[in-house]
Structure formats: C-alpha cells, structure tokens
Image (cartoon, rainbow, N blue to C red):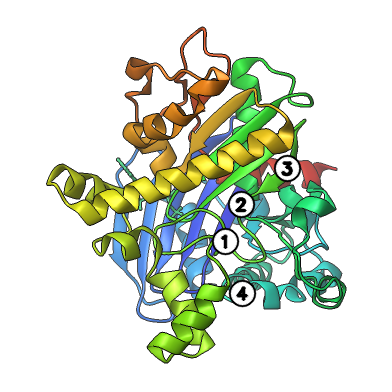
Amino acid sequence: MKILVINCGSSSLKYQLIDSDTEAVLAKGLCERIGIDGMFTYQKAGCDKKVSQIDQPDHKKSVSLVLEALTDPENGVVKDLSEIGAVGHRVVHGGEAFEESAIITDEMMKAVEACNDLAPLHNPANIIGINACKELMPNVPQVAVFDTAFHQTMPKEAFIYGIPYEYYTKYKIRKYGFHGTSHAYVSQRTAEILGLDYKKAKIIVCHLGNGASICAVDGGKSVETSMGLTPLMGLIMGTRSGEIDPGVMEYLAKKENLDLEGVMNILNKRSGVLGLSGLSSDFRDIDSAIEDGNEQAKVAKDAFVHRVVNYIGAYIAVMNGVDAIAFTAGVGENDPDMRKDVMEHFAYIGAKVDEELNKCRGVERVISTDDSAVKVLVVPTNEELMIARDTERLVLK
Ligand code: ADP
C-alpha cells in the first residue's frame, strides 16, 4: 500500500510517500512559509531536490501542491491519486484519550480538538492538515498517530505531579511526554538489532535533537519520560530551558518586570543551548566555538551533557537496570563527542563505548565494545516509517 505521511505545523507541512510493502520512501518534501508566501520542496527517490517559490495562502493549497507533484506525469511517483491507499498524520497531543493511533472519524476529531488547550501551538495546525487532506481526498482513510500515545503506559506515580490532585481530575494536568513515535521506533529497532525480546528488554532512548527527551522503555512500554505536560520540561534543548525550579518564573518576572507570557517566551525561545552559549541553538556551532576556546559554549555543552546523564541515571533506577542505551535525532545521531561524554558516566554499570565504533554519524550501529555490560547504540529515528506502519495496520484491520 502507498501511504502519504503528513506532519503539519502552523506554517509548514512535511510529507513522505511510503510504499508500505517495501518500506521505501518514493518521494518526500516540505511546504514552508504557508500563509506568508510559500516555498515548495519535492524530491523523488534517487533524484535531486526541486525547490520552488509557490504561493501557499493556506494548508489546503499546500496539500493540493503535494498531490499534484506526486501525480505529475514527468516527476511524479504515482499515476493517479487512487494509488494512495491511506494518509497518516502526525498529531502532537492525544491527551489521555488516545493510547494508540486511531482512524480519523468526525467523532474522534472531537476528542483531538479537546486536546487543543494542551498543545495550542501544535494541535490546531495538525487538525488543519487533516481537514485539508479530508477535503481533497474524501474517500481515502486517514489515521492520526499521536506523539503522546506511546507514553500512555506510564504508571500514575510517574505521570502525576505533586500538586493538588483536583488539578489532575479537573484539568488533566499531568506528565504526557512527547516524541513517542520516535521512542517507540528506536526502542523496537534497538531490541531487533541486539536480538533482545522487546517484551522483556530494558531500554533507554535518548532523542537528542533541537527538541530533546529521554524515555525509559521497560518490556516494550514507556514507563518514564523527561518531557511533561508540555515539551518544555526535562533536558536542556536548543532554545528551551527544560527542567527548572518553578520559583525561577516568579523571580524572573519580578526582576525583569515581565508578565507570564514574557517569562514563557524566555523559557521556550531564548533559553537552552542558545541562551546558555549566547551563540546558537545548533551544536555544530557550539562545537566549533568550543574549539576556538569559547568558555560559554563549553558551559552550554557541559550543562546539556550533565542533564542527559541525570536522566539516564534516574531511569536506570526506575527500571532497576538497563540492557541498552540508544542515541537518536540530530545531536544523538551526529555528535560522537557528546555520546562519549555522556557514556563515560556509566562506566560504573559496565557500559563501555568503543572509540572507533563511536566515530560515526547518522548510521545505525552498536557503538559499545563486545564486553560492554550495557549495549550502546546509534539508531537513526524514522517517525515517518512508524506512522506509515501504524496507518497500514489500522487501515487493514
Ligand atoms: P528537530 O527535529 O527537533 O528540529 P533534529 O533532530 O533535526 O531536530 O536535530 C537538529 C539538531 O541536531 C541541530 O540543531 C544540531 O544541534 C544537531 N546536529 C545536527 N548535525 C550535527 C552534527 N554533525 N554535530 C552535532 N550536532 C548536530
């Protein structure tokens, strides 16, 4: 089956057409600056990327451009739209309503809309993408795959916050966690690569990208993760603070004469690696600044590593052991020094990274030594493939 995977943001739309039989990507691309002007990128497998400026006043126009490109007689990959068997949509927040991916119906969309408050920047955009596809492909089944769903297996003691319980019952304030599709894919793949029984393995996945989170996967189930009610919690990220004392917010508001929105803006957009280094949110820039002797860049990297170590250590305790630790996403896949710095802290549990094997970027590989008590891996994430798999499974059910 050919499955169109859509990841819709407020002004962007990423897409891939995946053949679920071979799991090959037939074509992929990106619509950007939707509602502003419009850039359209299309890449057929094995061909060069084509980038063009095409006005996209709304997401419906973007979806129609994607469909035109996929069916284009010269550069397309399908003869007509009837060849597309289903559409899989990434949806950021499924709240407590969705423990799994779901076929899109009018009824279930009400439950998705009810989660908008929990992810006001993301969910409305995801819904716009779903509606645009429904309008342009009314007879094609659509599936929603939630970033939060994988974490719905967390036990209550892990997801509950230490605030009055009524705020959980009234407003559903709790830890949800994100990057679930990535954590699910990477943990499954880790078990496959190592020949471990997924239902018994204890795996820690470090998804370290611009947004970053860590997940403890025990017996194929997420039992702890570092993001919270929102993706602001946990690790130090590109521009997000991650975990801070909540008291900082009041103190900062008073000192800088800011309202809550002003403080949130600092924590979301001006903090993290960018805020600490004063330079960039991108680790490539941080690494080269460190080489040039920039002290603040070093502070940013050290603090990032320290926080990752904190969470891995905590999750080993939560699971009472660990079989494998996997690194994924932009930083996790591409930064050998960072992996080495993190893993040095786990020599005490017998984790040994092989320096030569660790010299890799963006490839799937075991990077621990043969005699390492805990296996360490690099597993490039593939959220789109996971979305395509789930979509096919639900459509064929
Ligand atoms: P997201 O999907 O959250 O936007 P990615 O997973 O694509 O983020 O990660 C992007 C980040 O990966 C960049 O900001 C950069 O910090 C990091 N990165 C990418 N390539 C490298 C590299 N070669 N070395 C170090 N860091 C890298």
Q: Earlier in the sequence, mark 4 or mark 2?
A: 4
Q: Which mark is residue 226?
A: 2
* CA distance separating discs 2 and 1: 7 Å
Binning the other alpha carbons within 10 Å of mark 3 as few (below 14), some (14 to 19) or many (20 upward) gives many
Q: Are marks 3 and 2 in contact (CB under 8 Å)?
A: no
Expressed as whole percent of the image width and height from the top left, the position of residue 27 reads 46, 46
What residue sits right under mark 4 in the picture?
128
Expressed as whole percent of the image width and height from the top left, the position of residue 166 reads 86, 75
SS state under label 2: loop
What residue sits right under mark 3 in the picture?
222
Q: Residue at x 63, y 55 (%)?
A: 178
Q: Which mark is residue 233?
A: 1
Q: Amino acid at mark 1?
A: Met
Compared with 325, 244 (above or below) is below
* CA distance separating discs 1 and 3: 17 Å
Q: Nearer the viewer, residue 97 or 155?
A: 155
Outermost residue to the top? 371
Q: Are marks 2 and 1 in contact (CB under 8 Å)?
A: yes
Q: Are marks 4 and 3 in contact (CB under 8 Å)?
A: no
Q: Earlier in the sequence, mark 2 or mark 1?
A: 2
Q: Quadrant of residue 124?
A: bottom right
Q: Amino acid at mark 3?
A: Ser
Asked if residue 247 lies left or right of residue 278, the reply is: right
Binning the other alpha carbons within 10 Å of mark 2 as few (below 14), some (14 to 19) or many (20 upward) gives many
Q: Amino acid at mark 2?
A: Ser
Q: Amino acid at mark 4?
A: Ile
SS state under label 1: loop
